[in-house]
Image (cartoon, grey):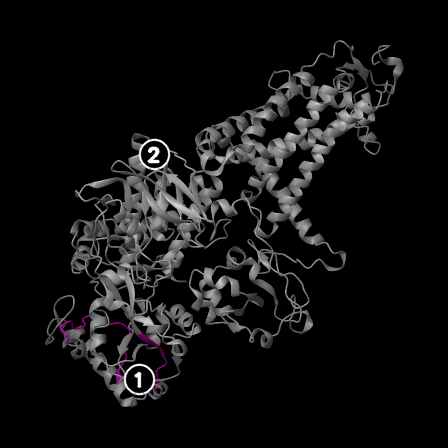
């Protein structure tokens, strides 16, 4: 089994919000990180969080004049009975700065606030679009991916299941993970962020061990939530806490045509925060909708199902995005008016009117006499609401209420709800540094936990909005503690925006690594979409009638923005679960899909699923748009139908255009920015110096072609650079040569430093192949040094000067058509004696040993250049759909250049040298 031990590397297990917060924080504190996730995509349950993230005293709250602070928040949180109040206090104290960190560092919109159940102030932050859990988590994923793309400070490996923690003495020093049927080891402090165990219904699960009474319930958790981190931590002596406390959420959404599904969508608690009320089968309220989750669930057990969550127009307008999304997924229904709702429920309209009227009256009394009601209120005081007051937890806060008289004509969004397993409050016991605690109540060195895998923070009931906060707060605490543990005094502040070249824009952007492994995807271009099978719809495409035939788990098609997707093989890998896709099997899912996903998500996650278009582009075997989705990141259309020429000329033209733009940018950035002078192991300097060297090699190869035209052209070409010595700052060289020398030095030093710092440590893990570039590079350095001394400083005095008539303006513009660029036949121009590099080349290459050495070295160059180009292309900013073609174009350029260089010694060995155009002005017997 292979091992590696980079001492400044931390290991994060789990790619949800906790893991991503930890990983980004490690980088911010000067460390390196490798993140391992057993799923096909990062994100975990965090992406499903629907209500928002809590923060007390945030800049958003202050701007809205909300009088909240950490003390008030702590009091609300501690009502859950936290066994470790110091952890709950840390959660609340850090909440403001950490929510502001999300806004400022990741450019997130968290400008909307809601008061969820159990909170005495509106402190649950979310943005205007998409689920907040997805938006926040994806932003952190993309930032880490950008760090991995631009630098070697981060690696992301998916489909990597960690199976064991490695100990040395009492310390945790690494882990073993399984990927592709093989086991690998990584070394460094470990941060466990692998989630809870709310989806493991097996007989030996933690759920079966601690809460067998809940095994009959459905869950909102993804299938990956099997308690791996807790089990591995316990295996090396870490203590656990509160494993019996499993939160049952009251508002799991029931899909009427699949009511018994084991995994259900969750209704955002914000639906109740904006004024949604819960009705039982009789059309009556029976609890305080804003009470704690365990309380609402308990009251549901006592009442009569089915239960409905009802939002009037004002409530639904405030959170319309969620309502439309749930409606599209078939778990919520829109009613034109109260009469239609009453009819569907099978109750009299008057009952629902009375329910609303009583709720409205209680709210109005609360406005005028807030603490004079007859019932005990939650969280404190008195309540006028009889329906909830009788339960001992009377309602005190109201929002978007309507009187009973409005119900008949009021439109409603309504969902059937049921209790579901949602969150595990218990987990590994941690201290205030997020370090796992061992049997002696001392921290286990090198082992940390963050997110749902850690326990003791929430007591027996977590408040809504605290799960995302838990991930961010303790992910950051763990990341900083791990960095301090491994770096000590070498910790330093690192700005994520600096290392990524600008950070994020605020949108969920395209990324080369999203949903995949750094090792798997960094150097692999996205495959084109699969060809559409024959027999599609008319007009060369598919009809909706054809799509509607594919509605099963074994044969599932959907339509998005006019594209037909065969997602059968993707169902099991979908981050949101199979049901999210199967709901739209055989249908047009465009509206609902675009509500959640960024525009390029098909190209990133499932490019091969696109099989054609509605009405065109499919059926006849046409290939769907490059990168999947008919458009690549950046909005560049990709017509992959080759047409009559059988070659997609336009796509190759576009790829060439983007290649030229990228190279031009990198060259200009290299010349005109000073950032590259810093010698570090950062890939930026290596990439830019490589681009400049490739450009020089191409120009040099084209220039050397003048050897075929004879000594006047070739020696004139050499003298052209001598005439530019005035640009060399007083040195016997020109500015081009000097900059090339600096680029070579930068490339060599950075390459060697990266090899020493990183690659040597990976030899045992990934084999000697990780040193291919280093080995071939050193061989090339040796060759270039010899070659430089042979030609740049070679002895041409032995031949005497060669006389050429140099054009007065550096270039012979009148000789362009005949390619006589560096000399002129104009006898009025005085000949100038120059170095006879033509004779020198013939002298050297007439020696077969030197020719073989040169040809071998050119072969090494081609290998080195192609290996390097494969690493360069994904980070040039080229739209994803063009990367594969750009890579192929690059290979072609390297091969052609190699053949050009090889042609020189072959030509010399096969021919005799020319005497020159004006033999009369040359030294007699110059070349034998």
Which is nearer the eye, 167 or 662? Answer: 167
Among the 4 quarters of the image, the one containing residue 444: top left
**Magenta stretch containing residue 359, yes or no?**
no
Element on which disc 1 rests? helix
- Neighbor class of circle 1 (other Cα within 10 Å; few <14, some 14-19, many 20+) is some
Q: Position of residue 327 (x, y in %)?
A: 41, 74
According to the picture, the residue beneath numbered tag 1 turns out to be 406
Specify which label sits upstream in the sequence, 1 or 2: 1
Q: Position of residue 924 (x, y in %)?
A: 86, 10
Does 158 appear above or below 914?
below
**Magenta stretch containing residue 397, yes or no?**
yes
Can residue 401 be spotted in the picture?
Answer: no
According to the picture, the residue beneath numbered tag 2 turns out to be 492
- Neighbor class of circle 2 (other Cα within 10 Å; few <14, some 14-19, many 20+) is some
Q: CA distance from mark 1 to mark 2?
A: 61 Å
Position of 830 compared to 139: left or right? Answer: right
Can residue 484 be spotted in the picture?
Answer: yes
Does 87 appear above or below 691?
below
Residue numbers of the magenta segment? 391-417
Assess whether mark 2 and mark 1 are in contact (beta carbons under 8 angstroms): no
Q: Position of residue 355 (x, y in %)?
A: 24, 83
Residue at (62, 37) in percent of width and height: 866
Q: Position of residue 719 (x, y in %)?
A: 74, 20
Position of 97 compared to 927: left or right? Answer: left
Does 586 appear above or below 780?
below
Among the 4 quarters of the image, the one containing residue 546: bottom right
């Amino acid at each position: 089994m292979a091992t590696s031990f980079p001492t400044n590397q931390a290991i994060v297990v789990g790619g949800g919000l906790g893991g991503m917060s930890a990983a980004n924080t490690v980088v911010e504190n000067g460390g390196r990180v490798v993140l391992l996730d057993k799923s096909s995509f990062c994100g975990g349950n965090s992406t499903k969080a629907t209500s928002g993230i809590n923060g007390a005293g945030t800049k958003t709250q202050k701007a809205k004049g909300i009088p909240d602070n950490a003390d008030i928040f702590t009091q609300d949180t501690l009502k859950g009975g936290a066994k470790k109040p110091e952890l709950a206090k840390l959660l609340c104290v850090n909440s403001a700065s950490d929510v502001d960190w999300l806004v400022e560092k990741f450019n997130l919109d968290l400008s909307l606030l809601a008061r969820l159940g159990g909170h005495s102030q509106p402190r649950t932050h979310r943005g205007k679009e998409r689920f907040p859990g997805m938006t926040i988590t994806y932003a952190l994923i993309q930032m880490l991916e950008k760090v991995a793309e631009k630098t070697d400070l981060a690696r992301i490996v998916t489909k990597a299941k960690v199976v064991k923690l490695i100990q040395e003495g009492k310390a945790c020093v690494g882990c073993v993970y399984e990927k592709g049927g093989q086991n690998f080891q990584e070394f460094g402090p470990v941060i466990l962020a692998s989630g809870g165990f709310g989806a493991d219904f097996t007989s030996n699960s933690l759920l079966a061990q601690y809460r067998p009474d809940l095994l009959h319930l459905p869950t909102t958790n993804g299938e990956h939530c099997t308690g791996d981190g807790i089990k591995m931590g316990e295996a090396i002596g870490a203590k656990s806490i509160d494993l019996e406390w499993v939160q049952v959420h009251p508002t799991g959404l029931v899909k009427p045509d699949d009511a018994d599904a084991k995994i259900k969508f969750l209704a955002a608690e914000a639906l109740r925060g904006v004024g949604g009320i819960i009705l039982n089968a009789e059309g009556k309220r029976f609890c305080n909708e804003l009470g704690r989750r365990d309380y609402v669930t308990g009251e549901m057990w006592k009442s009569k199902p089915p239960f409905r969550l009802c939002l009037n127009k004002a409530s639904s307008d405030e959170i319309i995005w969620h309502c439309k999304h749930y409606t599209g997924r078939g778990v919520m229904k829109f009613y034109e008016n109260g009469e239609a709702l009453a009819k569907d429920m099978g109750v009299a309209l008057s009952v629902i009117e009375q329910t609303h009227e009583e709720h409205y009256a209680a709210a109005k009394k609360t406005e005028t006499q807030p603490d004079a009601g007859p019932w005990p209120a939650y969280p404190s005081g008195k309540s006028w609401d009889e329906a909830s007051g009788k339960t001992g937890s009377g309602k005190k806060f109201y929002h978007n209420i309507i009187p009973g008289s409005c119900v008949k004509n009021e439109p409603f969004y309504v969902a059937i709800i049921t209790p579901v397993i949602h969150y595990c409050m218990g987990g590994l016991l941690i201290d205030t540094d997020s370090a796992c605690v061992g049997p002696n109540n001392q921290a286990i060195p090198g082992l940390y936990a963050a997110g749902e895998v850690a326990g003791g923070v929430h007591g027996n009931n977590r408040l809504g909005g605290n799960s995302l906060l838990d991930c961010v707060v303790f992910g950051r605490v763990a990341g900083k503690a791990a960095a301090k543990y491994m770096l000590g005094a070498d910790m330093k502040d690192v700005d994520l925006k600096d290392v990524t070249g600008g950070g994020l824009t605020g949108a969920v952007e395209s990324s080369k690594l999203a949903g995949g492994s750094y090792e798997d995807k960094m150097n692999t271009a996205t495959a084109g979409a699969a060809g559409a099978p024959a027999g599609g719809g008319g007009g060369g495409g598919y009809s909706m009638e054809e799509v509607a035939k594919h509605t099963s788990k074994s044969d599932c098609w959907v339509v998005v923005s006019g594209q037909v997707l065969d997602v059968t093989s993707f169902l099991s890998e979908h981050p949101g679960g199979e049901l999210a896709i199967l709901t739209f099997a055989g249908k047009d899912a465009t509206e609902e899909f675009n509500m959640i996903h960024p525009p390029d998500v098909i190209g990133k996650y499932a490019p091969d699923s696109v099989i054609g278009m509605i009405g065109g582009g499919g059926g006849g075997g046409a290939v769907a748009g490059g990168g999947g989705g008919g458009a690549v990141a950046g909005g560049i259309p990709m017509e992959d139908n080759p047409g009559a020429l059988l070659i997609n000329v336009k796509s190759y033209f576009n790829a060439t255009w983007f290649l030229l733009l990228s190279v031009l940018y990198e060259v200009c950035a290299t010349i005109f920015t000073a950032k590259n002078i810093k010698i570090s192991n950062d890939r930026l300097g290596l990439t830019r110096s490589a681009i400049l060297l490739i450009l020089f090699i191409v120009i040099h190869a084209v220039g050397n072609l003048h050897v075929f035209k004879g000594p006047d052209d070739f020696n004139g070409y050499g003298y052209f650079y001598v005439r530019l010595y005035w640009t060399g700052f007083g040195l016997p060289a020109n500015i081009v040569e000097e900059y090339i020398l600096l680029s070579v030095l930068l490339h060599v030093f950075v390459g060697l430093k990266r090899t020493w710092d990183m690659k040597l440590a990976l030899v045992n893990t990934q084999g000697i192949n990780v040193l291919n570039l280093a080995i071939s590079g050193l061989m090339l350095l040796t060759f270039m040094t010899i070659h430089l001394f042979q030609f740049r400083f070679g002895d041409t005095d032995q031949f005497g000067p060669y006389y050429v008539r140099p054009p007065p303006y550096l270039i012979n513009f009148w000789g362009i058509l005949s390619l006589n660029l560096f000399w002129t036949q104009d006898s009025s121009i005085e000949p100038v004696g120059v170095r006879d590099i033509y004779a020198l080349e013939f002298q050297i290459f007439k020696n077969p040993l030197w020719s073989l050495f040169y040809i071998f070295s050119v072969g090494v160059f081609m290998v080195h250049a192609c290996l390097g180009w494969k690493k360069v292309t994904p980070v040039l900013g080229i739209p994803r759909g063009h990367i594969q073609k750009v890579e192929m174009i690059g290979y072609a350029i390297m091969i052609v250049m190699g053949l050009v260089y090889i042609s020189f010694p072959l030509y010399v060995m096969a021919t005799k040298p020319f005497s020159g155009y004006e033999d009369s002005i040359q030294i007699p017997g110059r070349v034998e």
